[in-house]
């Protein structure tokens, strides 16, 4: 256990813009991502050579009234009759689909595999989206208590604040940082800093002849109950990732084929995945055990440690989740993550840049697509193709951390640039 | 083995205003909600055990944007719903509604607050359901 039977590489990656797209279904977004991916394969690929398709999707059944989505997406991209399989592990669906694709190539069964994540969420009204997301929790024993997803993470936040001394302001600073990062990402749902959004609201009030709000800075704006309402205390609107539509795609090949397709393949160095029960059944509410276990497996396989990771895309479905993730991944000691966040150490100029893409918070969180959305960012950064938001220096290792539910699933991948 | 430690059985006990879990007969380990199989030793040799209903608040939130279920129960932005993870005196933790605390002033709520169980009946006759809640002890 703990080792791939043969190496696997990424030779293409693409994504649709994440956001709210009226009139576009999951298949439309998937086609956009697929076509973009084809354009990133340096030496080109005949799509007819793809042998299998794994697709992460949380709940097209409830979001769009469409089950059995994988063969439809395969049909829309000319991939039939290859095997097309949907993987569901809530918000970790795409990360797990990636892992299944990796295992399929590593096993020797296939040489060329397409992996995707897709979600179309915005057709439903907000309360139905909330109810649909809640099906990722235990609907017999957690949901009847009144829990919503913001509620779960808010509870982890109260436990974390009580244990370590963080404050709601800590979480606000994580949101500000991710919006700053996302302002450099043309694919992000909110490609704007919170300060820009704040100024836009002032301008809009002035135009409408309404009293102009007197926020002097972002923190004042974020403390305003009207501008930044409480969703589940201490999580406010700007602590929560948005409701989003989007798709992301990567192409995997066996390591020995990588150079046939790509001048700069990105190699899978490590993969890990773990599961857990309901939040109330866990010993710790301030750490996600499945994330610790998945990270441990991935580090071991890659033969690296947290100190070797140049940057990471972590599952910041809520701002508290990013703080906990940076501890679970071993970047910071338990109880230190919030201090490092406040100190700017997770920003693009800090010691451990987290969520250069803007994270789920700013880039958007089409739940079943997010895990591959993260990988697209790592692909771009490691290949030096991230444009304005390219991290400086010779990057070697990038990590993705994708959580389903409150940690009932976590999947971690480590990617490597070799040259 | 016919499984009697079901969700339905737990909910029927709630309707009778009893908080019932299961106990591994050989090890004494307790489970709330009840489990038919002990995940640490795979034993299915269980019996029912009644919990005292005493516990303390381990984590909480005050939810302003509520699920359809809680909206129908009367919770909303001006009447937010306090929800928590409660550690029972017997050991296991469970998710439940917490009543009798001020959800509009969540920064005053404290982890560690002693609580006791409260059974909230909803609906009439055959449609009657009982919601598990806790309140300050």
Image: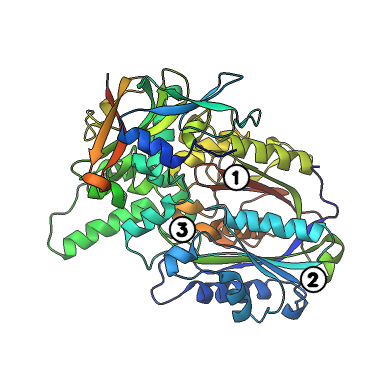
Tell which subunit mark 1 falls on.
A
- Labels 2 & 3 near each other (Cβ < 8 A): no
**Mark 1 falls on what kind of element?**
strand
Residue under pointer 1 = A410
* Within-10-Å neighbours for mark 1: few <14, some 14–19, many 20+: many
**Label 2 CA crowd tier, 10 Å (few <14, some 14–19, many 20+):** some
Q: Mark 3 lies on which chain?
A: A
Quadrant of the rendered image containing residue B137:
top left
Nearer the observer, A170 or A198:
A170
Identify the residue position indicated by label 2 in the image: A261
- Res. B127 visible in picture: yes
Mark 3 closeness class: few <14, some 14–19, many ≥20 residues within 10 Å: many
Contact between marks 3 and 1 (CB within 8 A): the answer is no
Say what secondary structure mark 2 lies in.
helix
Q: From this view, report whether residue A352 is shown above or below residue A369.
A: above
Quadrant of the rendering where the N terminus of chain A is positioned: top right
Identify the subunit bearing mark 2: A
Residue tagged 3: A364
Q: Which of marks 2 and 1 is in front?
A: 1
């Amino acid at each position: 256990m703990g080792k791939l039977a043969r190496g696997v590489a990424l030779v293409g990656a693409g994504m649709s813009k994440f956001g709210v797209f009226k009139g576009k279904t999951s298949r439309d977004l998937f086609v956009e991502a697929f076509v973009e991916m084809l354009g990133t394969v340096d030496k080109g690929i005949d799509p007819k050579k793809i042998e299998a398709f794994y697709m992460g999707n949380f709940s097209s059944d409830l979001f769009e009234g469409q089950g059995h989505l994988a063969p439809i997406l395969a049909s829309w991209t000319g991939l039939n009759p290859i095997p097309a399989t949907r993987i569901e592990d809530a918000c970790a669906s795409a990360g797990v689909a990636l892992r299944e694709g990796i295992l399929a190539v590593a096993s020797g069964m296939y040489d060329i595999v397409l992996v995707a994540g897709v979600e179309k969420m915005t057709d439903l009204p907000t309360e139905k989206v909330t109810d649909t997301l809640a099906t990722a929790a235990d609907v017999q024993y957690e949901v009847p208590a009144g829990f919503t997803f913001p509620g779960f993470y808010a509870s982890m936040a109260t436990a974390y604040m009580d244990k370590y001394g963080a404050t709601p302001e800590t979480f606000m600073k994580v949101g500000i940082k991710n919006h700053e990062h996302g302002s450099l990402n043309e694919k992000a749902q909110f490609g704007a800093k919170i300060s820009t959004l704040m100024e836009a609201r002032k301008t809009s009030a002035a135009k409408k002849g309404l009293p102009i709000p007197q926020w002097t800075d972002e923190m004042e704006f974020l403390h305003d109950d009207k501008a930044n309402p409480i969703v589940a205390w201490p999580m406010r609107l700007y602590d929560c990732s948005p409701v989003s539509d989007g798709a992301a795609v990567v192409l995997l090949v066996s390591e020995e084929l990588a150079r046939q397709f790509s001048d700069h393949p990105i190699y899978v160095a490590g993969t890990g995945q773990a599961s857990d029960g309901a939040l109330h059944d866990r010993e710790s509410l301030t750490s996600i055990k499945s994330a610790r276990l998945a990270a441990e497996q991935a580090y071991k396989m890659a033969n690296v440690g947290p100190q070797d990771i140049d940057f990471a895309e972590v599952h910041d479905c809520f701002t508290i989740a990013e703080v906990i993730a940076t501890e679970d991944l071993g970047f910071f000691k338990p109880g230190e993550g919030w201090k490092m966040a406040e100190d700017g150490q997770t920003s693009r100029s800090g010691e451990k840049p987290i969520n250069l893409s803007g994270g789920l918070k700013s880039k958007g969180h089409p739940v079943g697509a997010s895990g591959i959305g993260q990988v697209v960012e790592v692909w771009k950064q490691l290949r030096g193709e991230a444009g304005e938001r390219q991290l400086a220096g010779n990057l070697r290792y990038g990590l993705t951390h994708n959580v389903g539910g409150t940690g009932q699933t976590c999947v971690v991948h480590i990617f490597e640039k070799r040259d | 083995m016919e499984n009697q430690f079901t969700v339905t059985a737990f909910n029927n006990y709630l309707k009778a205003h009893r908080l019932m879990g299961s106990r591994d007969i050989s090890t004494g380990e307790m489970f709330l909600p009840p489990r038919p199989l002990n995940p640490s030793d795979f034993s299915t040799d269980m019996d029912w055990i009644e919990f005292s209903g005493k516990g303390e608040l381990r984590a909480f939130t005050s939810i302003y944007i509520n699920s359809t279920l809680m909206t129908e129960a009367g919770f909303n932005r001006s009447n937010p719903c306090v929800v928590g993870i409660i550690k029972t005196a017997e050991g296991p933790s469970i998710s439940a509604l917490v009543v009798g605390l001020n959800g509009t002033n969540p920064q005053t709520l404290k982890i560690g607050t002693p609580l006791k169980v409260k059974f909230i009946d909803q609906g009439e006759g055959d449609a009657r359901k009982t919601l598990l809640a806790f309140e300050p002890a």
